Structures are given as structure tokens and as C-alpha cells.
């Protein structure tokens, strides 16, 4: 087993997919980098399990603040989306104008050659 294969299996520890298979355990036993990663994932899993029992009181102020931050983030993303939409529309119009001009030039040249 290689370290990159091991790295794809480690998140399964946090997701609750169960323990690592024998091959992954053997690799971790000989690889210091994977041992450190494995220890971090196991610590993360323990911390997440400990947080499952923590209850945070939800106050009206907390909800209000949370919704305000969500709205603020949506507005920022929305302004970027509008900017990209405007830029795309301007770019599309420029491409269409260039294509139209090219067609007119080609047709007018053909017309001049035929008349001459």
C-alpha cells in the first residue's frame, strides 16, 4: 500500500466506516507520516464524538446574528455572480459583434469580386 492510498482511507475513520483493514494497519505500522495522519484522524473522531453530547442554548440573538451573517455572505456571493453575469454578457456581445462584422466583411468582399 502507498501513502496516497492510505490518505483516501483515513477519512472513513471519521465518517464511521469502521476500522482500517489489515493492509492499511500494516502500512501505518511502518510509515511515520501515515502514523501521524492516523493519530490526527483518530483524535478528530474522538473530539467529534465528545461534541455530540454538547448542547448549545439557542437564543434569539444567536439566531439573528447567524441569519445576518448568512444574508451577508449571500449578498457577497450574489454581487460576484452579477459581476460575472455582466462580464459574460459583455463578452458574449463582443463575440457576436465581431462575428457579425466578419460575416459582413466577407459577404461584401464576395459581392465586390462578383461585380468586378
Image: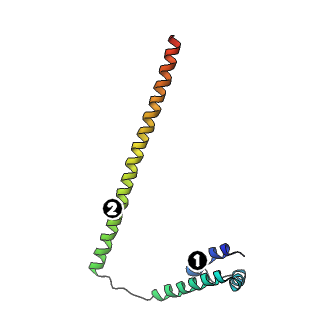
The x and y percentages for residue 67 are: 31, 71
**Is residue 49 toward the left or the right of residue 83 in the image?**
right
Label count reads 2
106 relative to 32, above or below: above
Disc 1 secondary structure class: helix
Circle 1 packing at 10 Å, graded few (<14), some (14-19), many (20+), is some
Mark drawn on residue 3: none
Disc 2 residue crowd, few under 14, some 14–19, many 20+, Cα 10 Å? few
Residue 40 location, x and y as percent?
Answer: 56, 84
Q: Is residue 103 left or right of residue 19?
A: left
- The residue identified by callout 1 is 11
Q: Is residue 46 above or below residue 106?
A: below
Residue 65 vs 74, above or below: the answer is below
Query: Which structural element holds mark 2?
Result: helix
Quarter occupied by residue 94 = top left
Q: Which quadrant does the N terminus fall into? A: bottom right
Cα–Cα gap, marks 1 and 2: 33 Å
For this orientation, the residue located farthest to the front is 32
The answer to which of 1 and 70 lies nearer the viewer is: 1
- What residue is shown at x 48% (from left), y 27% (from top)? 103
Closest to the observer: 91 or 57?
91
Q: Earlier in the sequence, mark 1 or mark 2?
A: 1
**Are discs 1 and 2 less than 8 Å apart at CB?**
no
Q: What colour-coding does the image apply?
A: rainbow
- Judging depth in this view, the residue of 48 and 94 nearest the camera is 94
Q: Where is residue 69 shown, x and y percent of the image?
A: 32, 70
Query: Is 62 situated left or right of 105 in this image?
Result: left
Residue shown at the point (34%, 68%) measured from the top left: 70
Q: Which residue is mark 2?
A: 75
Amino acid at each position: 500500500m502507498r501513502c496516497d492510498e492510505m490518505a483516501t482511507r483515513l477519512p472513513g475513520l471519521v465518517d464511521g466506516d469502521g476500522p482500517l483493514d489489515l493492509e492499511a494497519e500494516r502500512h501505518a505500522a511502518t510509515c511515520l507520516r501515515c502514523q501521524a495522519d492516523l493519530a490526527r484522524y483518530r483524535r478528530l473522531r474522538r473530539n467529534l464524538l465528545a461534541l455530540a453530547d454538547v448542547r448549545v442554548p439557542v437564543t434569539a440573538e444567536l439566531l439573528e446574528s447567524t441569519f445576518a451573517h448568512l444574508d451577508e455572505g449571500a449578498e457577497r456571493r450574489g454581487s460576484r455572480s452579477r459581476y460575472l453575469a455582466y462580464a459574460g454578457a459583455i463578452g458574449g456581445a463582443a463575440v457576436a459583434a465581431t462575428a457579425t462584422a466578419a460575416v459582413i466583411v466577407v459577404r461584401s468582399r464576395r459581392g465586390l469580386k462578383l461585380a468586378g
